[in-house]
Image: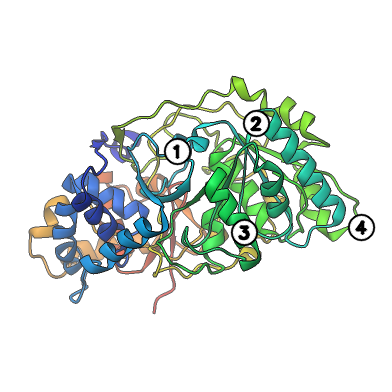
Amino acid sequence: MAEDLIPSPTPLTPPHSEEEKLFWLRLLRSRRVGISTFYRLMREHGDAAAALDALPGVARDSGLTDYRPCPEEVAAHELRAGRLSGARLLTVGMPDYPAALLDLTDPPPILWALGNTDLAARPGAAMVGARNASSLGLRMARRMAEDLGAAGYVVTSGLARGVDTAAHLAALRTGTIAVMAGGVDVVYPAENAVLAQEIGETGLRLTEQPMGLQPQARHFPRRNRLIAALARGVVVVEATAKSGSLITARDALDIGRDVLAVPGHPFDARAAGCNMLLRDGATLVRNAADVLEALGPAEAACPAPPQPDLPLPDTGADPDGSVTRDGRGQVVPLKRRRRQDARPAADPAAPAHHDETAPDDAARSAGAGTRATSSRSGPSSTAGPRVSGPSSRGAGAGSGQSAPNSRNRDLHADILSHLGASPVLEDHLIRDIGLSAGRVLPEIVTLELQGRIERHPGGFLSRLPDR
């Protein structure tokens, strides 16, 4: 069964010309094409230009008759805006692409970077916390960031108010990375405009979102997973019980990063999230020395070498065992697991920037502390809406089939009958249906494109309400 789910990956060659970059951008920015669909199309058709040509036909096979890919002028405008702002386009497979992001199940195919990209190859420590942090919390963030930077770590955070701002300011001299929820040229909050400019000059600003995009609540959970992946461990300084910082902690847990927390008084609501993490097994830290003891010295952290020719992410449930899961596919330990080399990632759903309808940080982080030892196993774990993708029936794109036959309709009904609101592992679904993966997977993708099922990180699927 596992062999059926994980076909042999093909090499992914990064774009070398402006025309190829344009094709990549058009494909990724097309309606209903998210990260998993992008990789699936690239795997099936070999390059972005061929995938763009096939996309309308695949959509037509799934019942969408008026589908059009992203217009060329839209992608060209984004490239021009990036050049004008001084940002660089990084794609999977390029030497400057952060290798640490390959540990994600959905590494972004395209990133915009402004500043020193070499910082992403150095060992990092993420610091997150409350926007309305207390004076003691801000003092802790500043002192810890200064000491971690002096020890050789790059401090990564999200450029938000409070703890994020304090950590960036303290680490400006030694190196800091700001992962942004909107476009790399859009500073949020506006009060951090000067800080963002200084980070662009001495540090690194990074985002997967298009140029000029104003951040919205649904974009921040997507940003949080990048913060977690870029670091060897995530330090939570202050966080309420329903904090976006707990989303970052959960993301770190999912990919085997350390989760560390600063304790607080039980009567202080801003310490509730940290205390919940500590109760569930996070490492208690009082200063940078405790963080260094947990993460190890910076010089011992050897980043993975750049890989110019990377395999495409493919569907599968952690085939190399780098994340320990129980019988239901859930991650179980919270303490640090041994970090593995970069591996091919699974095919999660991730929406295009104009196609997302995710809940905000508070809604997604509800109960995160009490689930700190499990992976994202519910709808709250997804940062975006359903992101449908073209069918994996490679030849089907040009077959001219306009509607599923009765056999396919019966299989669609069977798939939907096995799914509900609670996500189920894709390989478990295929096993329960009793057909081969080659027969079931194309119809799963068709149902994604029709907006009837949703894919979650880690290879989980759930059914969406009928419209």
Pointer 3 local density, CA inside 10 Å: few below 14, some 14–19, many at least 20: few
- Image point 46% across, 40% down: which residue? 117
Q: Which mark is residue 267?
A: 4
According to the image, label 3 marks what residue?
A: 194
Point out which mark residue 336 bears: 2
Circles 2 and 4, Cβ within 8 Å, touching? The answer is no
Q: Secondary structure at mark 3?
A: helix
Identify the residue position indicated by label 1 in the image: 98
Mark 2: secondary structure: loop
Color theme of the render: rainbow
Give the mark nearest the N terminus, 1 or 2.
1
Dividing the picture into quarters, in which one does residue 411 lie? bottom left
Residue 167: percent from the left, percent from the top? Answer: 70, 47
Q: Amino acid at mark 1?
A: Pro
Task: Compute the Cα span from label 2 to label 4.
Answer: 29 Å
Q: Is residue 117 above or below residue 20?
A: above
Label 2 packing within 10 angstroms: few (<14), some (14-19), many (20+): some
Residue type at mark 3 is Val
Which quadrant is home to the N terminus? top left
In the structure shown, which secondary structural element does the residue marked by tag 4 occupy?
Answer: loop
Contact check, label 1 and label 4, Cβ < 8 Å: no
Question: Which tag is nearer the camera, tag 3 or tag 2?
Answer: 3
CA gap between label 3 and label 2 equals: 36 Å
**Would you call the spot at circle 4 few (<14 residues within 10 Å), some (14-19), or many (20 or more)?**
few
- Distance between the alpha carbons at the discs numbered 1 and 4: 40 Å
